[in-house]
Amino acid sequence: MKILSSEQIYEADKFTIKKQGITSDALMERAALKIFEWLHGRLQGAQVKIHVFCGIGNNGGDGMVLSRHLFEHGYNFQTYVVDFSEKRSKDFLLNLERLKDRKIWPSFLEAKSQLPQIGMDDIVVDAIFGIGLNRQPDKWVANLIKHINTSPAFVISVDVPSGLPSQKVSWKFTSVIKANHVLSFQVPKLVFLLPETGKYLDTWEILNIDLDSDFISGLESNYFLTQRSNLVSIYKPRTKFSHKGTYGHAVIIGGSHGKIGAVQLAGRACLRSGSGLVSMFVPGCGYNALQSSFPEAMILTDTAMDHITEIEIPFTASAIGIGMGLGTFKKTVVAFGEFLQKAKQPLVIDADGINILAKHQEMLKQLPENSILTPHPKELERLIGSWDDDFDKLDKANAFSMKHGVILVLKGANSLIVDGEKGYFNTSGNPGLATAGSGDVLTGIITGFLSQGYNSLEASIFGVYLHGLAADIKASEIGFEALIASDIIENLGKAFVELLRPKPPQNKKET
């Protein structure tokens, strides 16, 4: 699914209005009706108090239309106009008059107005600002936002949480609605998926308001949201007459004294994700542990016992993952650099492999094209430098990816895969993944897909999604806190089954 800019969404609105021969008011009616249907489907007429806060633009117009439908279905509600400007949109004014025609009188809130009381069992609908916000809210509006945020009510935002800019801005956005749920129109917004801005909403969903699909298909986009259908389309199923050699021979390189577990996790994940054969290259101290606990793997060892000092692979590997538990010892750094000079195919580099590259950036020139780096936030900062905000981070990550011809997997909530031109946000996973070894497992999975013939971008997207899906399956049984890295590996099979399970038929049109 494409993630579009505010300007592109406005253009899609205009095109849809012209092509479908409707008015902008009719499109607003369609959007607000989707909001009402969502609410009505859950409340079924329940007489909770609903507070609808409307700005004076089109987002506020959505709130006005919603208020009319609430009135017509007998709900207990109060509508407020947050009167922060003399400028009002045409469709806002039109729908304000429609409320007045029905003897519905909104309360107008101004700088000196008393703030309304909001009860524990109440619902707040936030329709103050939309995606067109271009300045910091006035101080009194900021106080209203704070009042809503400190209330015990459940807060639903229309399209975006008010005060949250939809793209990079020049001001510090501190006055933002903290929404329990966002009902957004047609496409996800980039700010939902970034750590600094995504913290202002708990959950979100997309309501289809039938903007012209052909127009949207023709729009260029830098970012996409990865969905299940995308994964099914790139999945390479096994064939009847294949054998283990068909699915590649992957090598996992890493480990040091006390950190052999990292490579074991990566190797097991590599095999579980479908690699035909897996060999492990570790220092001598890892031989007995791996040979006894991981019988499916073949073990190669360095002559040194405590850490890797020389990397020699006596065959051509289909894919190589390197860095887990590797350490940054002087001889290990030298061995890593010499290994890069000989490497021909794309690598998957994690953990200390990234830390070595960050300290010795001249080695970046040796990376095979389309290698995959999987940094967590601190490793990314060491690699590309600090950033001012998440938008700056995206710019720097894209520039780094483009300059060095590599794919970056930025790990975190909504992990982002960047290939220098496009970015792909992941939709699987949960907070349980914040556990030791989960990154090692991810490296193994991506290496496993690479060894089976997926290209680097496919392996990264598929690997990140399946990693998160396996964690989701297990977390649904034991909760986030109890999830450990081995659980992810053990549930990869269930994740494959779930990915390929046919969707149940829909009885009604999805929103």
Image (tube, rainbow, N blue to C red):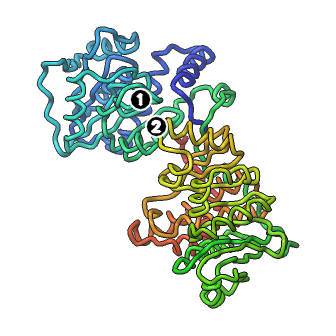
The amino acid marked with disc number 2 is: Val
Q: Is residue 297 visible?
A: no
User: SS of the residue at dot 1?
Assistant: loop
The amino acid marked with disc number 1 is: Pro
Relative image position of residue 156 (x, y in whole percent) = 33, 38
Classify 330 as above or below 109.
below
User: SS of the residue at dot 2?
Assistant: helix
- In this orientation, which residue lies closer to the viewer: 510 or 242? 242
The residue indicated by pointer 2 is 191
Quarter of image, res 371: bottom right
Classify 426 as above or below 489.
above
- In this orientation, which residue lies closer to the viewer: 117 or 363? 363
How crowded is the residue under tag 1: few (<14 C-alpha within 10 Å), some, or many (20+)?
Answer: many
Relative image position of residue 317 (x, y in whole percent) = 80, 69
Identify which residue is drawn at 35% across, 41% down. 200
The residue indicated by pointer 1 is 165
Identify which residue is drawn at 37% across, 26% down. 171
Taking the image as shown, residue 167 lies to the left or right of residue 98, namely right
Q: Are marks 1 and 2 in contact (CB under 8 Å)?
A: yes
Query: How many numbered tags mark residues here?
Result: 2
- In this orientation, which residue lies closer to the viewer: 20 or 372? 372
Classify 274 as above or below 59.
below
Q: Which disc, if any, is residue 178? A: none
| Mark positioned earlier in the residue sequence (1 or 2) | 1
How crowded is the residue under tag 2: few (<14 C-alpha within 10 Å), some, or many (20+)?
Answer: many
